[in-house]
Amino acid sequence: MNGPYSWQVPQLEQLRHHLLKQDLAHAYLIDDPAGEGSQGFVRALASTILCEQTQLGGCSNCSSCQLQSAGSHSDLLWVMPEDSKQIKIEQIRSVIEWSHQTPQQGRAKVLVLDPADRMNVYATNSLLKLLEEPAPNTYLFLISTSPARLLPTIRSRCQRLNLLTPTDEEGLRWLRETRPDADPELLQDVYAITGYKPISAQALFDSEQVAQRLAMVAALTEWLKGYCGPIETAKKLAAKEMPSLPYELLYRAAASAQRQQVLPQANRRGVFQALIDELAGRWSTKALSRLAEACGKARSLSGASNNLNAELTLEHFLMTQQKPV
């Protein structure tokens, strides 16, 4: 069974209801701006559609569910960008040919474009033909974190579905259930560092970068308190693989500090919370807004810098943002 995340169940139940009534739309644009859970959502929905029992997320027992678990279901096609990082016209042409074939295992076929906004212009124009003349018993799901990048003609031919996101409390509860042995304070830190995105937090736990992120957060707090100067702090923060990371962390902390000034948060501890508390306690709301804006701009520009320039740019950034005026 491709079980959905708990906060996604209401939307999936609603779509299953439409499926049973035989009025499920033939094309959906899955809007997932946070990039959290869209693949799991669509997998669960595809399993529901293809399951012989139409059970939410699949029954795991029927031949269709077993084929999907093995990754060999002929009526499920998941299209992703090729080496060029684009979905090309050749892929869409193959998709159209596939869509007009009779389902091999059951009553329907499921096609997923992930992410749909990576289609080049030729692929997009080719896809329009399928949207304008949908193949019978074929459901199309376009996953996108940036739907605005899709042509209006594509968006207008799909039913838009904005994915539900968990509340901070729901996300943390889910994370605790998936990491029952984790230190509660560390769990809270990782959750906050990822912008209160539970799936991203889980992925960070699975990586070897937790200590690096926490060290960066601690360095930012020392800089804000005046314990460490911009040059030394920039050396601590310089991340060769992800030059935008220091700006991202400070941006999230500034945004959280703004929320905390309006709605104080109780019982939150940890390294990242210490950074938030420092900002919320000493910086005005207006200063935090300027800091967040500056972080956003620096984050966008950081990808174009080489490693040496990235450290120098970070030094300059810290010097210009040192006083909360």
Image (cartoon, grey):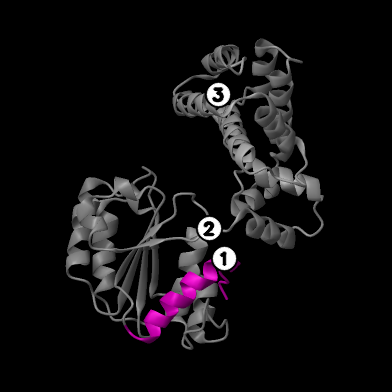
Q: Residue at image x 53%, y 71%?
A: 9
* Residue nearest the observer in this picture, 82 or 291: 291
Q: From this view, report whether residue 138 is shown above or below residue 282.
A: below
Q: Quadrant of the N terminus?
A: bottom right
Q: Position of residue 17 (x, y in %)?
A: 42, 82
- What segment is highlighted magenta in the picture? 1-22
Left or right of residue 209: residue 143: left
Q: From this view, report whether residue 313 is shown above or below residue 272.
A: above
Q: Disc 2 marks which residue?
A: 165
Q: Residue at image x 63%, y 50%?
A: 203
The tag on residue 53 is none
Q: Position of residue 194 (x, y in %)?
A: 61, 43
Left or right of residue 160: residue 42: right
The tag on residue 7 is 1
* Residue nearest the observer in this picture, 186 or 142: 186
Pointer 2 with pointer 1, Cβ within 8 A: yes
Residue 2 in the magenta stretch? The answer is yes
Q: Disc 3 marks which residue?
A: 287
Check disc 1: other Cα within 10 Å, few if <14, some if 14-19, many if 20+. Answer: some
Q: Is residue 44 visible?
A: yes
Q: Quadrant of the C terminus?
A: top right
